[in-house]
Structure formats: structure tokens, C-alpha cells
Image (spheres, rainbow, N blue to C red):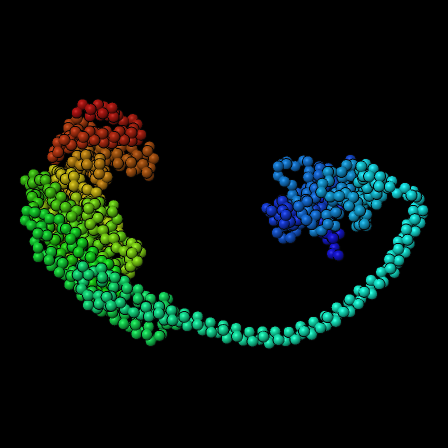
Amino acid sequence: MSKSGADDEELKRACEAAIEVGACKQKVVLSIRVAKSRGIWGKSGRLGRHMAKPRVLAITTKYSPKGRTKALLRVLKYSSGGVLEPAKMYKIKHLSKVEVIQNDPSGCTFMLGFDNLRSQSVSPPQWTMRNINDRNRILLCILNMCKEILGRLPKVIGIDIVEMALWAKENTNTVTSQVIARNGPDLSIMTPNDLKVTVERDLVSQAEEEDMEALLGTYVMGIGEAEAFSERLKRELQALEAANVHAIMESEPLIDEVMQGLESATVCVDDMDEWLGIFNVKLRHMREDIESIESRNNKLEMQSVNNKSLVEELEKLLERLRVPSEFAASLTGGSFDEARMLNNVEACEWLTGALRALEVPNLDPCYANMRAVKEKRAELEKLKSTFVRRASEFLRSYFASLVDFMISDKSYFSQRGQLKRPDHADLRYKCRTYARLLQHLKSLDKNCMGPLRKAYCHSLNLLLRREAREFANELRASTKASRNPTVWLEASAGSNQAANSADTSTVSEAYSKMLTIFIPLLVDESSFFAHFMCFEVPALVPPANSSKSGATADDANDDELSLMDLDGNDIKPSTNSAELGALNESLQELLDGIQEDFYAVVDWAYKIDPLRCISMSGITERYLSGQKADAAGFVRLLLDDLESRISMQFSRFVDEACHQIERNERNVRQTGVLSYIPRFATLATRMEQYIQGQSRDLVDQAYTKFVSIMFVTLEKIAQADLKYVDIVLLENYAAFQNSLYDLANVVPTLAKFYHQASESYEQACTRHINMIIYYQFEKLFQFARKVEDLMYTISPEEIPFQLGLSKMELRKVLKSSLSGLDKSISNMYRRLQKNLTSEELLPSLWEKCKKEFLEKYESFVQLMTKIYPSETITSVAELKELLGSM
């Protein structure tokens, strides 16, 4: 018998280490391994909901300082490292019920009920022992703990307490143990005497005692004396044995008859054994014959089944190898007329399926090397090459004939007095007839698509270029607009300024009409070409883009090419970089050359009004932002080239205007406001009116170049005569601010140059005013400058004793400078007015001059008062009053 869990001393030591009994003054009485579960035992004896978890139950005692002994039930679990650690703890004093689960056939599962649990709705855990002995050990230990320590027993359900007592009597040595409490008396958990008392006192009820007395009362003959009762039993036994011997002696004749019958039966059995041996030999030979017959029959049946399967497979293979006569006729010599296209498509589908059926994935590899299969594959390849060659030649000639027919009919193109929008609906309808054929040609031989695409591109390119050329020519001829001169900022252009205000909006409208008609057309042609020629790329133009580009909904529906694959499903092409590159190369061949007619419209619009480049740039940018599909690469390149050409033409206009500005510096002497400054304001106002969409950057760049050249030229012109440099600068910067005041409030670029002109104006004013002040009062401020220079080296008290700075010298300077002060100030005003051509600037300049002179004189008075405190100087208040009166 294996070692019981309750006798495992190693487990007990592990529990003591986990609980740390030494620290908490506890002793482990009993430890045993159990399985914990919360399920309900079913009829099969397995847990219903949860898997069992390994646990260890340990019963411990603890002696309190008051002399009381407490019993605890501890639950320990295994950590991830296999070490025991405390999980839960129950107090024995709260134990109210011990129930053995009846549904467990082994009887090893029980449940402990406590009356202090927080949630009584949750079923308490069930504990399953390894065997009945372990269950009885722990339950007896718990019951005796309750009896010895608490003086009461919990409610016991599902177990016979008499059986428990009998089991305890048989296993007294195993169950009996002593608990030595620290610092307290010994506790005897269970002894045989206690057990006897328990059985007599607790385990037999009053009703059971009455039944036993009634049973014993039936034996009235000496039942009270054991010896008399024993003698009586011996006599009855002897009488019974004598009766048995007598019965045996009386049955001897019957036994003789039975023995004779057995002897005759033995003879019959021997005879039957010989007969069965003979029959067994014959049956063995018969079985061998039957087995040989069955073996030959099985071989014949297997051969028959194999032959039948072989015939079926050969019939299927022959069906694959057969070429229908009607398909062979269509592939080798059939017509490609529209009425015959359905037959041609069916023949292509059959040929594609036949070739696919002879490939190894679809054909058993054992058939691949058969001579008949190889010959049939070669025959199909020949049919394929013949059909692909015939179909390619027909389609190339068909594309050329369609385009030649349209080009020969002038009604397809714009004529004098009539702008005609290109209409390719009929062309695309006729091409759609052969769309299915092209898909089959690509599946049969991808190499044939290159020449077909080139033929289609070459033919349609002629038609598109002719349509664009005729449309652009008639568009320019039908647009009426007066031509504006390109001389905007030149001094001699004063008489032409009226012409610059002429309305040239029809030029921008003509360019917009060119884009509105042809950009959607080119995009639709690119989309149709990509689908018609079976490029595996996404759709080029979503429906929303068609409306943005100016195309109508009907056009989008007409240009839609909904193709299907060979199985009849809609094609959903995937993005392929190689296919995308090939498509862009083909689109280059399809649309190349058409950009020249767009360039001609741009150049024509530039000659009429260069400023219309601004509005054309905005129109182009709007169309360019609507083209996001990578497959329509040529259309984006065309719009990029148009934008570059418009920018180049506008840059040419800006360069010419800048050259006109630079011509002004060649004049030797110029006074007053330069002519290009007010004319630039007129030009800027006109440019702001032409801005559309994204052309803001183009105009701002032009502003930057214009104003930079204007300011540089102004500085060069001013430097031509140093005597009047500041007058020229302040007048022109003031004129620049006055003419661009309104625009600078709404245009950030002009606002930046406005502030730059304002700073330059202030600097020129300051220099000019200082020159006038120093010219009139030079001696006065030179004397002050000398004093300031000496103050860095000597003390203020020593300055009056320096050569040329004595008090006498100060009086001479004051007399010569301040005598006739009103006359000197009048001279300043006249000098300020003398060379100024802009009279409206004089009041503000004179106020600045008076303010600057007053500040300088105030500094002079403070300095002289500090150095020459005893001298009398005209006060600042007197000078301020005098300046206010003038």
C-alpha cells in the first residue's frame, strides 16, 4: 500500500515552511493533498464546469495567551516554481456542515460549509481525496477538533457515522496523534476510549436500541447465560451434521444410476469426436478450394474494372484531343465581319480552353509525354498562331480604315464660323465590337498586343491632331479682342494707357474652352485605350473627375468600356508597374503632337494681352489638380507643359517690363516722381483682376521682381546727382506708398514692399532734414560736437579752459547762430521748399524738420548748461514758441 497523504512528513514540513509556524506560534496537525473544484458531479462522475486544481489542506492549532486553543483549516496552492504558498484560511469554529457528495461514485469528494462566508449564493469549493482512507482521516480529525475544542459537532450529511467509528477502531494507530501546544497543555485528538464513548453515546439512537432489545427478546432460552447458550448451539450443530450423513447414505442408488448414464454418454462423445475429425478434414480441403476460386474471381473482377476505367479515360482524352470542325474553320479561314464575331469569340474560347486542358496542372502528368498529346498540342499551337496573325492583320487595317473615313469627311471637324466639338461615339461603338476579340488575343499571345497598340495609336493620333488643329484655328479666328501693347512701364507709354484697359476676357475664355473641350476628351481617350487594349491598370477617370473636367454625364457613359474576362465576370484590373509604364509609352504615341495646338493658343493669347497669362495659369492649375490618376500621365504632362509655357511667356513679359524700368537710369538728370511708379500701381491693379485659382504665386513672383528692379533703379537714378539724392528718394518712395496703399492692405507681398518703401522714405527724410539743419546752424552744432568729444577724456569743469572752447568762444557762436533766429528758420523752410517737386509733401517734411531741430537744440542747451552753467542761452521754450508761429 502506497504511503498515505496524511503520513507524508515532507509535505508537512513544506506546509510549516509556507505558513511559518515558528513566527505565528502554530502547529500543523495534519496535511494532505486534495483536488479543488466547483463543479457538480454528474452521473458519469466527472466535473461539469471547471477543471480540478491541486491544493493542500492543512489543519493547524494555535495557542492564545488567554489559554484558549484555536483550530484553523488552511488551503495552500502551488506557485509557478512548484513551491507551496498560502491561499485561504478558514476557522474551525465557523464550520457548520460536512457533506459527502453523493453523486461521486468513489465517495472521495466532500464539501465543508462555513456560516461566516460573505456570499452564500456562490457554491463552496469541493475537495476530492485520493482514496477513502484519506477522506476518513481528515474528516475524523476535523470532527474530533470540533468535539474537543468547541464541544459540539457540525451537521454530517452523506456518510454513516457508525462506519466512520468502525474504520477509526481498525486504524487507531494511524488516526491517533497528539498535538503539543506551545506554552500550554497537551491535547489528545482521539483515543480508543473516546471513540467507544462516542459510539455508545452519540452514534446509536434510542429507536435503534429499542429494535435491538426486541430482536434479542425473541431468544428466551438461556439467552442471559453465555455458557448455556453455547452448549445449546453445539448440540444443534451435532444434530445437523448427523442429519446430513444420513441423507447421503440414503442417496447411493441414485448415484449408481447417474454413473452408468455418464459412462454411456462418454462413449457417445468419443464416437462423435471421431466423426467431427473426419468432417474437419473434408471442410479444410473444401475451404482451400473455395479460397483459390475466390482469388481467381477477384483478379478477374479487378481486371474488368481497370479495363472499364481505362476505356473511360481514353474516351475523355480523345474528347479533349478532338477539334470541332466549325471551330477549326473559324480559326483558319473565317471572316471577321461583325456578324461573324460571335462565332470567332466562341472559337477563341474553345481554343483557349483546349490549350489550358493540355497543360500539366489540368492534365495528368502521365499523359503529358504521350505522342498523341504532343501532336495535338502542336496542332493547337499552329491554329493559335494562324488565328492571331489573321486577327492582327485585320484589326490593324480596320483601325486605319476607320480613321481615314473620318478624316476624309470634313463635317467631323470645326469649320469657318462653326466650332465643332469632337465626337468619337461612333468610333468607339465600332471598336467595342472587337473588344472581346482583343481580350482573347491577349490571352492567346501577349506579344501580338504591341503591334496592335501601335497601329491604333498611330491612326487615332492623326485624327486627334487634326481635330485639335482645326478647333484651335477656328477658336482664334472667331475670338474678337483688341491687342494691348506690351509697353507698360516705359516713360513714352503715357498715350497708350487707355488701350491697356481694353477688355481681353475673351482670350481667357477661348483658352478655357480649348481645355474644357479637349482635356476631358484626351482623358476619356486614354481611359478607353487602356481598357480597350487590355492594360491591367486601375480606372483612369472616376465619374466625379469627369464632371470636374467639364465633361457631361452622357459623355462619361458613352466613353465607359465595361469589359468582361473569359469567364464572363467584370474585369477588376490590379495595379502593375510594368503595365503602367507600357500604357504611358503608348499614350505618348497616341497623343504626341497635340500639345503644339495648345501652345499656339497660349502664344496667341500672350500677344493680345500678356496679363492674360495670369488667368490662363489659374485655369490650367484647376484642370491639373483634377487629374490624379497615374495612368493618365500624358494629360498631366501636357498640363504641366502648358503651365510651364504660360509661366515662361509671363516671365518674358516681366523681363521686358523690367527692362523698360532699367532704361530710366540712362537719363542723366531726373527729378520728381519717376513715371514707372504710378504706372506700376495701374499694372498691379490690373494683375489682381486677372488672378484665378492658383495663379497667386505667379503674380507674387512678378511683384517681387518688379519692385526689386524699381527700387534698385531708383537708387541708381538718385545717385546720379548726390546733391539731390535724398529728395529724389523721398519723393518716389512717398509716391510708391500713396499709389499702392489700397492694394497693400489686401496683398501681403505688396504690403511687405510697402513697409520697405516706408522705411526708406523715413531714412531719406531724416538725412535731408539733417542736411538742411546742419547747413543753417553748422557752427552751433560743431561747437557742441567738440565739447562732446572732449568729455570722453577730461572732466566737464576743465572744458571751458580748452583752446577754442572758452566762454568767449561760446558767446561768439551763440551770437552768430541765434541772432536773427526767425530769419534762419525761414531760410531753412525756403531751402526745404526749393528743390521739392511734390508740394503735398512739404507740410509733413516741415513738421519733421521743426521737430528734429527742436530735439537737437534741446540736447545742445542741456550740454551747454552742464559745461557753462553761468552763460545765458536762448531757452527751448522760446525756440518752440518761435517755431510754432512759423
**Is residue 290 found left or right of 174 in the rendered image?**
left
User: Looking at the image, is 57 positioned above or below residue 580?
Assistant: above
Apparent side of residue 441 relative to residue 473 in the rendered image (left or right): right
Q: Residue 337 in the image: x percent, y percent?
A: 17, 61
Q: For this view, does 475 lie left or right of residue 117? A: left
The image position of residue 205, as x and y in percent, is 80, 38
Please tell me in which quadrant of the rendered image residue 775 appears: top left
Image mark count? 0
Q: Residue at x 68, y 43 (%)?
A: 111
> In terms of depth relative to the viewer, which is nearer, 457 or 684?
457
Residues 289 and 218: in front is 289
Quadrant of the image for the N terminus? bottom right
Residue 608 in the image: x percent, y percent? 9, 46
* Closer to the camera in the image, 755 or 412: 412
Q: Can residue 47 be seen?
A: yes
From the viewer's perspective, is residue 136 above or below residue 781?
A: below
Query: Does the image show residue 613?
Result: no
Q: Residue at x 67, y 72 (%)?
A: 276
In this rendering, is residue 50 above or below 818?
below
Q: Quadrant of residue 372?
A: bottom left
Give coordinates of residue 180: x percent, y percent: 80, 44
Report the side of 130 relative to 624 (left or right).
right
Residue visible at 68% across and 38% down? 114
Question: The C terminus appears in which quarter of the rendering?
Answer: top left
Above-or-below relation of 278 to 755: below
Measuring 18% from the left and 54% from the top, which residue is drawn there?
Answer: 428
